[in-house]
């Protein structure tokens, strides 16, 4: 009769498997490659958690549940701060240290992160690179195209406002390059009324601004980190590197919430 092993910390978290995943490509092995791998693997874990929270957030918003939406958004914001903080760790690696193993990365690139593309898609962004970076990866393309059919955060927030009795209009998906939605003067007026007369929905809308700002902050810190590490060199995956990344900074994903600042 076999005796089942009790569940331990190591088995539950699969620590042995986890610690076997940091496999350096440099030969001889460069010290800082381990840091590079761990940072990016950790990013992917946090991306997974954010996508998990996005799912709950959209459900709660569409159902008109304010406080669970607020709680979920606050968790996402805290994770975003952690993502930004990890750049501080990565910046302890000098350009010389990175260049010692960069050639071993071949064509691998952060541009190929499927989960980050999923996050951008749910945030309402669309651009050709989302599919072009995975033209030879059909499973990734299937995931990306499926995400494009899902409800975005902004659509979920508008549905929330409608459930609260506000006459917000569901935005139309009109753009294929950049943000899906055009700014809406009508919805901006609705949001101004929300700010004045609906404290709970107003708090929620400000958390959306916090998230938008947090995403922009991460993009800025990321581009500056890349710039100080490789300068104007091409990215490892053949991308334009810093030149491309600069184009993604300061692009709001909730422009209506920013536009009303001048009218409140």
Image (cartoon, grey):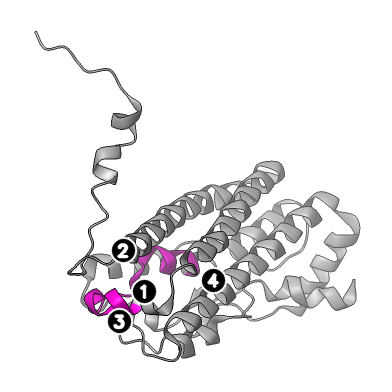
The mark closer to the camera, 4 or 1, is 1
Quickly name the residue at label 4.
124
Question: Would you say the residues marked 3 and 1 are in contact, meaning their CB atoms lie under 8 Å apart?
Answer: no
Above or below 228: residue 146: above
Is residue 158 left or right of 197 when viewed as pictured?
A: left
- Horizontal side of residue 247 vs 40, given as left or right: right
| Closer to us: 186 or 208 | 208
SS assignment at label 3: loop
Quarter of the image where one finds residue 6 = top left
Residue 250 picture location, percent across and down: 63, 80
Residue where numbered disc 3 is placed: 237
Q: Disc 2 vs disc 4: Cβ atoms closer than 8 Å?
A: no
The mark that comes first in sequence, 2 or 1, is: 2
- State the residue position of label 2: 31
| First of labels 2, 4 by sequence position | 2
Side (left or right) of 138 relative to 42 = left
Marker disc for residue 97:
1
Indicate which disc, 4 or 1, sits on the residue closer to the N terminus.
1
- 106 inside magenta stretch: yes
């Amino acid at each position: 009769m076999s005796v089942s092993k009790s569940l331990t910390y190591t088995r539950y978290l699969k620590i042995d498997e986890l610690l076997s995943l940091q496999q350096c490509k440099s030969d001889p092995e460069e010290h800082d490659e381990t840091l590079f791998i761990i940072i990016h693997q950790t990013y992917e874990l946090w991306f997974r958690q954010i996508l998990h929270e996005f799912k709950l957030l959209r459900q709660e918003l569409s159902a008109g549940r304010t406080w669970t939406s607020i709680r979920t958004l606050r968790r996402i914001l805290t994770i975003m701060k952690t993502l930004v903080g990890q750049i501080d760790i990565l910046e302890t690696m000098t350009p010389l240290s990175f260049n010692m193993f960069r050639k071993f990365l071949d064509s691998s690139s952060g541009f190929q992160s499927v989960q980050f593309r999923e996050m951008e898609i749910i945030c309402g962004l669309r651009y050709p690179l989302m599919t072009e970076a995975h033209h030879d990866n059909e499973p990734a393309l299937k995931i990306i195209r499926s995400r494009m059919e899902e409800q975005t955060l902004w659509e979920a927030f508008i549905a929330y406002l409608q459930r609260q009795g506000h006459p917000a209009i569901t935005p139309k998906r009109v753009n294929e390059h950049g943000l899906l939605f055009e700014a809406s003067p009508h919805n901006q007026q609705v949001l101004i009324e929300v700010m004045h007369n609906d404290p709970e929905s107003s708090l929620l809308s400000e958390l959306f601004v916090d998230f938008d700002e947090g995403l922009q902050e991460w993009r800025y810190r990321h581009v500056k980190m890349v710039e100080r590490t490789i300068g104007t060199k091409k990215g490892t995956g053949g991308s334009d590197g810093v030149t491309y990344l600069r184009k993604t900074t300061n692009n709001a994903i909730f422009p209506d919430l920013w536009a009303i600042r001048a009218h409140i």
